[in-house]
Amino acid sequence: MRRPVDPRALTEVGAVLGRVGEGLAAAEDDLLSCLVVMGEPDPQRALDGWVDQVVDVLRAVDEVTAQHRATIARSTARRGDPLDAPSDEPAGSGPR
């Protein structure tokens, strides 16, 4: 049996995922802005490769986060619940 979904909880999760995405983008920018020069070709290649791998992981996590946010937005829109409209009922007391 499916349990009812609280649209406000969906909105809250979407907002948290948005903040996660912002943090990932900031971490990527910070990492890419650091230019470390090793002076030796082999260590430099190893460091550059590591930085590229970490940035790739950050981008992949950001992509998955964006996909989840889009799914949440579609789910909320499909339910047709006006999330910003004031309600006289306590959360979770509406029709099921």
Image (cartoon, rainbow, N blue to C red):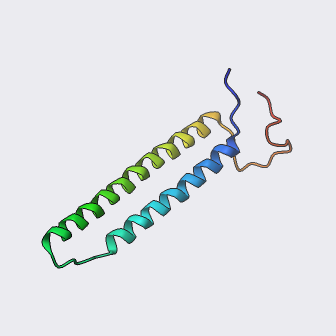
**Relative to 76, 33 lies left or right:** left
Q: Residue drawn 23% across and 61% down?
A: 49
Image location of residue 44, percent across then percent down: 19, 70
Q: Residue drawn 33% across and 74% down?
A: 33
Given residues 53 and 6, the one toward you in this image is 53
**Relative to 47, 74 lies left or right:** right
- Quarter occupied by residue 80: top right
Where, quadrant-wise, is the N terminus in this rendering? top right
Across the whole image, how many numbered discs are drawn on residues?
0
Q: Residue drawn 79% across and 29% down?
A: 95
Where, quadrant-wise, is the C terminus in this rendering? top right
**Relative to 10, 31 lies left or right:** left
Image location of residue 73, percent across then percent down: 56, 43
As displayed, is residue 32 above or below residue 91?
Answer: below
Q: Residue drawn 50% across and 43% down?
A: 68
Given residues 69 and 53, the one toward you in this image is 53
**Residue farthest toward the top in the current orientation of the protein:** 1
Given residues 96 and 16, the one toward you in this image is 16
Image location of residue 20, percent across then percent down: 52, 57
Image location of residue 62, percent across then percent down: 43, 53
- Quarter occupied by residue 91: top right
